Image (cartoon, rainbow, N blue to C red):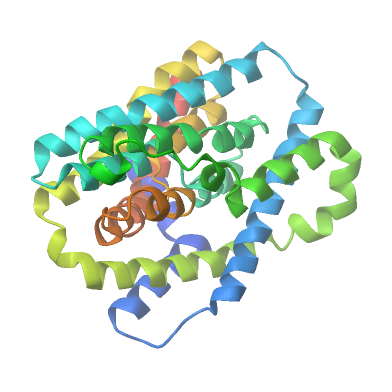
Amino acid sequence: MADIFALASQNLLSPVVLFFVLGLAAALAKSDLAIPEQVAKTIALYLMFAIGFKGGAGMASHGLDAKLVGALLSGLILSAAIPFVAFGYLKTLSKLPRVDVAAVAAHYGSISIVTFVAATEALKTLEISSEGYMVAVAAAMEAPAILVGLYLAKSAVDKNAGGEVPLREILLNGSIVMLIGAFAIGWITGTEGLQKVESFIVSPFQGVLCLFLLDMGIIAGRGLRQGGKLLTPPVVFFALTMPVIGALIAAPFGWVTGLSAGGVALLCTLAASASYIAVPAAMRVALPEARPSIYLTLSLGVTFPFNLTIGIPLYNMIGTWIAG
């Protein structure tokens, strides 16, 4: 337990987390601090490009094997199963309408790529290696959760009862296209390709990530201000405990697959995180009745900071315990 708090303290004092806190505090204090939307989108695309390319190059150096296939299958299974767990759990804890519960469940079955990046950087700080292809697992975990969330909400929304699932919006979401595309290019060009763009996607990465987390803090603070009345204690309790439940569900998959300690930690992080990019975009199209003030505030305003501060150190401990 002492190790967990030591890692949490170290993570709290990292520039990435502190910039998130700065943005959160600025928004709660009603400061006019803001990052222009187009700049924020450019930063997000840069992060997807850098993450995907480095992951593809890492997989090229690793090669295609049974462990990679097992990790991908594990990610797909977790992404499809966790929304059912989240749905039942939140339905038991709260009196929220079914459509809102289903939308929240979809967010918790999907992943937060920024949480994944923060976990990767934490592993580097601790000098714990991980499989480079875990970014491919992250990309694979987006769509299944959205489909399951829509399935769970279908009976509650008459207009969607016979409608089509927005596969195009899911699969062609800009962040997913950039992530998968950059991963493919990194895989094709390998280590040689990475060396050519290293000065652009390695050294500046931490600074750009800090700016992105500043923007995320501002958005989270605004969400807490606007949606605070809807966040009853049971709902907040869900957002604080569901990440741990997801991580504990994922841990055996990492062990069976034979991932390294860092790989298990990242798989737990993916299962514990909640989407606030791809899933909200899909929900706006497919479930306009679901309230962003609930699902976005929970994923970004409660679970995201929990994972940054307490969750990631805990998942690192789980990975070390299982595969260390």
Q: Quadrant of the N terminus?
A: top left
Q: Position of residue 43 (x, y in %)?
A: 62, 66
Identity of the residue drawn at 49% across and 11% down:
256
Left or right, 194 with reference to 233: right
Q: Position of residue 142 (x, y in %)?
A: 50, 38
Would you say residue 55 is visible in this rendering? yes
Q: Is residue 209 above or below residue 253?
A: below
Identity of the residue drawn at 18% across and 41% down:
98
Would you say residue 3 is visible in this rendering? no
Identity of the residue drawn at 33% across and 32% down:
151
Quadrant in which residue 183 is drawn: top right
Identity of the residue drawn at 54% across and 75% down:
37
The number of numbered badges drawn on the structure is 0
Left or right, 306 with reference to 54: left
Q: Position of residue 35 (x, y in %)?
A: 52, 78
Q: Position of residue 34 (x, y in %)?
A: 47, 81
Decide which of 140, 252 is in the foreground and name it. Answer: 140
Quadrant in which residue 258 is drawn: top right
Left or right, 60 with reference to 280: right
Left or right, 117 with reference to 89: right
Quadrant in which residue 154 is drawn: top left
Q: Is residue 88 above or below residue 38?
A: above
